[in-house]
Image (cartoon, grey):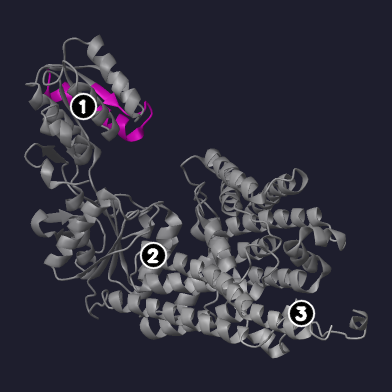
Amino acid sequence: MLFHKKGSGKARVGAIAAIAVSIALVATGCSSGGGDSTDGGDSDNLAITFLPKNLGNAYFDTSDKGGEKAIGEFGGTYAEVGPSEATPDAQVSYINTLTQQGVGAIVVSANDPKAIGGALNEARDAGVKVVTYDSDTDTEYRDVFINQADSAGIAKVQVDLIAEQIGDAGEIAILSASANATNQNAWIELMKSDIADNHPNITVVETVYGDDDDQTSFDKTAALLQTHPNLKGIVSPTTVGIAAAARYLQTSEYKGKVALTGLGTPNQMRDYVTDGTVTAFALWNPADLGYLAAYAAKALIEGDITGAESDTFEAGDLGTYTVGADGVVLLGDPYEFNKDNIADFDF
Amino acid sequence: MTNTTTVTPTRVYRDYGQPLWRRLLVNRESAIIVLLAVVIVVAMLSVRNFDNPITITYLLLDVAPILLIALPMTLIIITGEIDLSVASVVGLSSVLLGTLHQAGLPIPAAAFIAIVAGALGGALNGFLVTVVGLPSLAVTIGTLALYRGLAVGLLGTTAVTDFNEFWTTLAKSKIPGTPIPSITIPFLILLAIFAIVLHFTPFGRGVFAIGLSSEAATFSGVNVNRTKFILFVVAGAVSAFAGIYYTLRFGSARGDNATGLELQVIAAVLLGGVSIFGGRGALHGVIAGVLLIGVLGSALRLANVTSDVINIITGVLLVLSVVSTSFLFWLHKQRSQPRRIRRVDTGTPPA
């Protein structure tokens, strides 16, 4: 085929130039929009950036809003960045970027206890304070960890709730996750000893395992109610279990007769609380978690705490907190959700 | 018709229709390099902290796996095939390195086994494509799932993280006195090998020939199946090497490491001017394509642009690059068509 050299080269250059200009415009447009938002002062750089496991996760949306509220109260600069997938390698890129930006502190929920450690230490070498929340890294990679709840608190709130709902007497059963779930087993042991010590009229007749599977948990609930006709209450220390049990109770003859409580999320439990199947359940309040993490970051930046044991700091509406062993700050007792407050939460 | 033998029409081949300097400077690869330079300059002027040397360090550390895998991927796409399983091989190699190290093997031995496993994975792709004769798109979608499944199955949802400090530090280290990470050295060595093989050897000419026409290549003496098989094996081995780097850099062997990386690699290769239909492409364009995606991502993250928007911009860029190639080709045909007719018209009356 014949080839004509006139024209085609110029057209190509023209088109390429057009693409280059448009991309340059895109790049400048975006940067002018967000470029100066992390600008902090020289002395106390209160630019605090939240890096959740991933974006678009209702739980972290709630917690990071709590952080934003706190940062607004003390006049810092709030930002939230994060990957779309909850993977550690994606978080590393963001930690590197935040190091380059020279933010005051990173508040991060780790996708891996170790994989993001190197990047976090580079950030700390550059003077950035690191607070982990919700999900911790190994202790050598962060300044403080904001722990949402400890085992004793989680066990106690569930025993208190069920005791209140069944009049502190009668048979109860436990619907757990899998038989070898570390967290659940620890909580169940603590619940049993709490009941034995403080609630002598309550008997735990059986512990069944729904394997954190919706259908299995549903079937186990049905079996429990048939095996124990005198059952007055069920405690399910897992979000999958409590939702499945509530779904069974809602349409059964036991609705309103057998009490149900445990650990659940407001969005899963809203219907059952509204129609009276469940009176109250517990979980920590993610908004408070973010709020406390933001204040801990502020205290680190301003040098009020270093993350050493028994350091204390003020956390706005939540009061005064003390750093425990290994730089862990405990949020406090789990939060109780009921008909009156469930509408305030969306996660 | 008898006089046609005496007239020797000056046939000008498309590729040699322009002077040397124009062929070298005005082409798709140069366009991407210019675009890369423009984006870098714009980012330096408008994005805070982008002009910091540490940007280069983090940028190269981040794109190193993409750069590495883009080398064999370029050759595979030039032959008209594709390998979608590369990111899963990265994951599998990561898990193998982790589990073997946990079982007590030193890192070099575990890395060697992981690379051999990667090459075997590539060989399976190559076998199914060349011997069984299945399309590489279908084969590697299958092995994408297969190798990822093996990786996650071997390690479950846990991670191996107790790697020797020496190796993890080495993976992140910089060439002394520069902000350039050390991983650039093995990459440059591989780049030199791939560039020589692709652009200066009969094997490389065969790769282009297969992409233009598999049958014509066969008749010109290119062993099509052998060439493709070798490329898939090399892609597996290089992906496994990238997996080892990935694992040591993050100090974490996980089954879900590098999920979705294949799309970034293929995007960069296509952006770099390699034709998805095969037969066209050059490595310097691909390197610029990888760096362009990396620089854009880095600059936009520094400008606090969310990951979704970065994905949108990268996606638009890729579509534009593919569309522009087709558009320019169409434009070229439109312009040359009337002239050819005219020449034919003026040529016929004497005959």
Q: Position of residue A6 (x, y in %)?
A: 65, 88
Residue A76 shown in magenta: no
- Judging depth in this view, the residue of B298 and B49 nearest the camera is B298
**Disc 3: which chain?**
B
Vertical comparison of A260 with B3: above or below:
above
Q: Which mark is residue B13?
A: 3
Which is in the foreground here, disc 1 or disc 3? 3
Q: Give amino acid for label 3.
A: Tyr
Residue at the spot of label 2:
A94
Q: Residue A120 appears in which quarter of the rendering? A: bottom left
Q: Give amino acid for label 2.
A: Tyr
Q: Secondary structure at mark 2?
A: helix
Residue at the spot of label 1:
A246
Marks 2 and 1 sit apart, C-alpha to C-alpha, by: 40 Å
Which is in the foreground here, disc 2 or disc 3? 3
Q: Which mark is residue B63?
A: none
Marks 2 and 3 sit apart, C-alpha to C-alpha, by: 49 Å
Q: Residue A193 appears in which quarter of the rendering? A: top left
Q: Position of residue B250 (x, y in %)?
A: 49, 58
- The magenta segment is A174-200
Marks 1 and 3 sit apart, C-alpha to C-alpha, by: 76 Å
Quadrant where the N terminus of chain B is found in the figure: bottom right
Residue A195 shown in magenta: yes
- Judging depth in this view, the residue of A277 and B23 nearest the camera is B23
Q: Is residue A63 left or right of residue B282?
A: left
Question: Which residue occupies 23% across, 47% down?
Answer: A148
Q: Are marks 2 and 1 on the same chain?
A: yes
